[in-house]
Amino acid sequence: MRRKLAAGNWKMNGVSASLDELKSLAGTHADPSVDVLICPPATIVQSAAQTVDNTPISIGGQDCHAESSGAHTGDISADMLRDAGATAVILGHSERREDHEESSEMVRAKARSAQASGLTAVICLGESLAQREAANTLDIIAGQLAASLPDNSTAENLVIAYEPIWAIGTGKVPTLAQIGEVHDFIRTRLERRFGAGVGRGVRILYGGSVKPDNAADIFRVPNVDGALVGGASLKASDFSPIIKALEESA
Ligand code: 13P
C-alpha cells in the first residue's frame, strides 16, 4: 500500500516569521496517518527542519543543482539541502522549467544527484493549456516521464507530481475524469519502466489549485496518492483541512 502524501510548495514565499505556520501545523497534526512534507524557500530550510524536529512533518527543498559542489554561484546542491535537514526536493516544477529553461534532461540530472544524496525527488510533470486543447496531454506526459526520471529510481526516492500548468494558481481544476486519466497513464508507464513492484509503489500527487473545498473529491480519484499544494499550503488553517481530507481518503 502506498502511504498518502500531503506536500506543500511555498515557492518564493516565507521568511522566519512563517515558521509559526509550521509550528501550528505540527501542533494540529501530531500523529498524522499520512506523510506531510513542506518545501519552504532555501533560506529557511534549516530553521524549518529545526522547527519540526521530533514531529512527523518533513522538510524539502524546491530545486537543487545537478552537481554536489563547485563553481556555481547562487546554486544549492542536494548535499547542502540534506545537510540543512531536508529529506526531499521538488524538481522540474513548471515554474522552473519556464523561468530557468530547465529541460527534462536537466531535471533527470538533478534528480540523480538528489537521490544519490539520500533525498526523495518529487518530480513535476504537466501540460500547458495549448497542449491539452490540442489533445497532446498524454504524449507530453509520456515524454516528460521518459526523460525526467532517473533509471534506478525506487518507490522511496521518487514521487511524481502531475501539475497541469493551466491549473496552477488559477483556481481552474481539471475534471476528476481528466485527473484520473493522467494518473492511470502515469501508473501504467511507471510499471512498464520500473517493473510492477517499484511502479506500483511510487506515489503520484496531483497539484494545481488544490484547496480545502475540492481536496476530498480529488483524493477519491484512483491513483491520486496525495497533493502538491501551492497557495493553500502557506497557512496552516488552509493546509490542515487538506491533510485531514487526505487522511479520511486513506
Ligand atoms: P497552487 O496550489 O497555488 O495552484 O500551486 C500548485 C503548485 O504549483 C504546487 O507545486
Image (cartoon, rainbow, N blue to C red):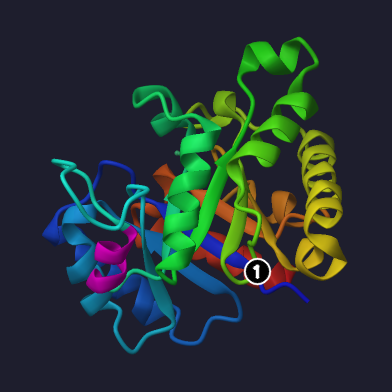
Looking at the image, which is closer to me, 69 or 218? 69
Question: Quadrant of residue 25 in the image?
Answer: bottom left
Tell me the residue that label 1 is attached to: 4
Q: Amino acid at mark 1?
A: Lys
Q: Is residue 166 left or right of residue 216?
A: left
Reply yes or no: does residue 3 show up in magenta: no
Identify whether 250 is placed above or below 206.
Answer: below
Q: Is residue 207 visible?
A: no
Q: Is residue 58 visible?
A: yes
Looking at the image, which is closer to me, 80 or 223? 80
Magenta region, residue range: 78-84
Q: Is residue 178 left or right of residue 76?
A: right
Q: Residue at x 67, y 74 (%)?
A: 3
Looking at the image, which is closer to me, 103 or 33? 103
In the image, farthest residue toward the front: 70
Q: Residue at x 53, y 45 (%)?
A: 108
Find numbered disc 1 in the image and state the secondary structure of the residue it sits on: loop
Question: Quadrant of residue 225 in the image?
Answer: bottom right
